[in-house]
Image (cartoon, rainbow, N blue to C red):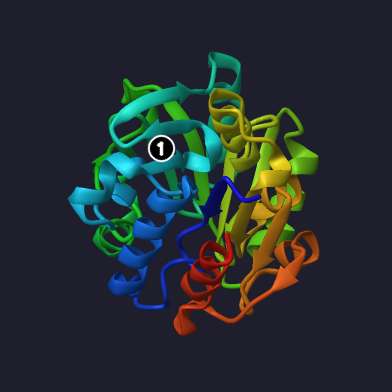
């Protein structure tokens, strides 16, 4: 029996235009309510950005595992926050000092995401695709916020290898390919599966009654944790290896179609 369905956003739920089939979403939410299935948005993205993607009337029915598991909510109700401590932030400062000149970076916190003014307007505008709340600052040391995650941009197709390189250099933090051009850095052991475990414990749902969809390195733990898991056709190799099955691409609404199929069979 399926009691919880979780999906990543970029490259999974959202198509290449950052859109999705709204009619199919509404069908999914109606069926999920009818069948008693919890629908979870599990993303490395900022919560405030994720909220803008969905009609307000469904917000109370949605669960969010944001910032790669560090920020978990039911609608607007905060269920869990896991931020970085001072030692971990010091290590992130080391990474920024070593790689920040060649690789633009983003600091993600509870109140906002932050990037450096020195990276320029084009990078700032690009980040608004992923961060609803975003501030350009002179330096990260001046930021006063609870920080979840640090993201380092890479060239296209370079993120997986760069994540492995960073992991060898800085083993006290977790590094995953959030996309094919970005490495997400967070607390050791923090991932989307942590958020799903918390929801499972809270609502009495074991892992084998969960289904997950993903496409990136930051989906691997979640795909391995649940009972059924699917990677999209355009997923990174590590996501495909971790999934039970491969479906079509996000441009084909493959996730929405598979979710509807699973719900209709319950």
Measured as percent of width and height from the top left, residue 136 is found at 26, 43
State left or right for residue 259 relative to residue 197. left
Q: Is residue 249 left or right of residue 129?
A: right
Say which of 41 and 84 sits in front: 41
Residue in the image at 54% along x and 28% along y: 203
**Residue 167 position (above or below residue 162):** above
Q: Position of residue 261 (x, y in %)?
A: 55, 71
Residue situated furthest top in the rendering:
86
The total of numbered circles placed on residues is 1
x and y, in percent, of residue 18 in the image: 35, 71
| Between 52 and 105, the one nearer to me in the picture | 52
Q: Residue furthest bottom?
A: 252
- Residue 107 image point, x, y percent: 42, 38
Rendered image quadrant of residue 111? top left
Whether residue 147 is visible here, answered yes or no, is: yes
Looking at the image, is 98 positioned above or below residue 154? Answer: above
Assess disc 1: are there few (<14), some (14-19) or many (≥20) residues with their C-alpha within 10 Å of its C-alpha.
many
Residue 94 in view, yes or no: no
- Quarter of the image for residue 175 reads top right
Residues 139 and 199: in front is: 199
Q: What residue appears at the point 66 percent right and 68 percent down from the top-left corner?
A: 231
Lateral position of residue 128 relative to residue 35, left or right: left
Q: Which quarter of the rendered picture does the C terminus lie within?
A: bottom right
Residue identified by numbered label 1: 108
Local SS, label 1: strand
Which residue is painted at 41% across and 37% down in the image? 108
């Amino acid at each position: 029996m399926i009691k919880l369905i979780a999906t990543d956003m970029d490259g999974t739920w959202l198509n290449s235009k950052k859109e999705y089939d709204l009619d199919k979403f509404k069908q999914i939410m109606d069926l999920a309510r009818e069948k008693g299935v919890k629908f979870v948005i599990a993303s490395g993205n900022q919560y405030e950005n994720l909220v803008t993607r969905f009609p307000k009337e469904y917000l109370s029915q949605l669960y969010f595992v944001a910032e790669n598991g560090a920020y978990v909510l039911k609608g607007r109700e905060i269920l869990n926050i896991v931020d970085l401590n001072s030692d971990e932030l010091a290590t992130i400062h080391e990474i920024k000092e070593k790689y920040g000149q060649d690789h633009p970076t983003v600091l993600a916190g509870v109140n906002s995401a932050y990037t450096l003014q020195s990276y320029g307007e084009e990078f700032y505008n690009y980040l608004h695709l992923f961060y609803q709340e975003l501030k350009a600052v002179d330096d990260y040391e001046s930021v006063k916020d609870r920080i979840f995650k640090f993201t380092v941009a890479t060239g296209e197709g370079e993120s997986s290898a760069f994540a492995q390189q960073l992991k060898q250099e800085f083993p006290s933090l977790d590094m995953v390919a959030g996309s094919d051009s970005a490495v997400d850095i967070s607390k050791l052991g923090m991932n989307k599966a942590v958020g799903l475990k918390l929801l499972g414990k809270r609502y009495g749902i074991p892992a084998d009654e969960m289904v997950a969809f993903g496409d990136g390195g930051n989906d691997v733990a979640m795909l391995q944790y649940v009972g059924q898991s699917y990677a999209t056709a355009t997923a990174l190799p590590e996501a495909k290896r971790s999934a039970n099955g491969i479906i079509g691409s996000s441009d084909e609404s493959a996730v929405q179609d598979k979710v509807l199929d699973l719900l209709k069979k319950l």
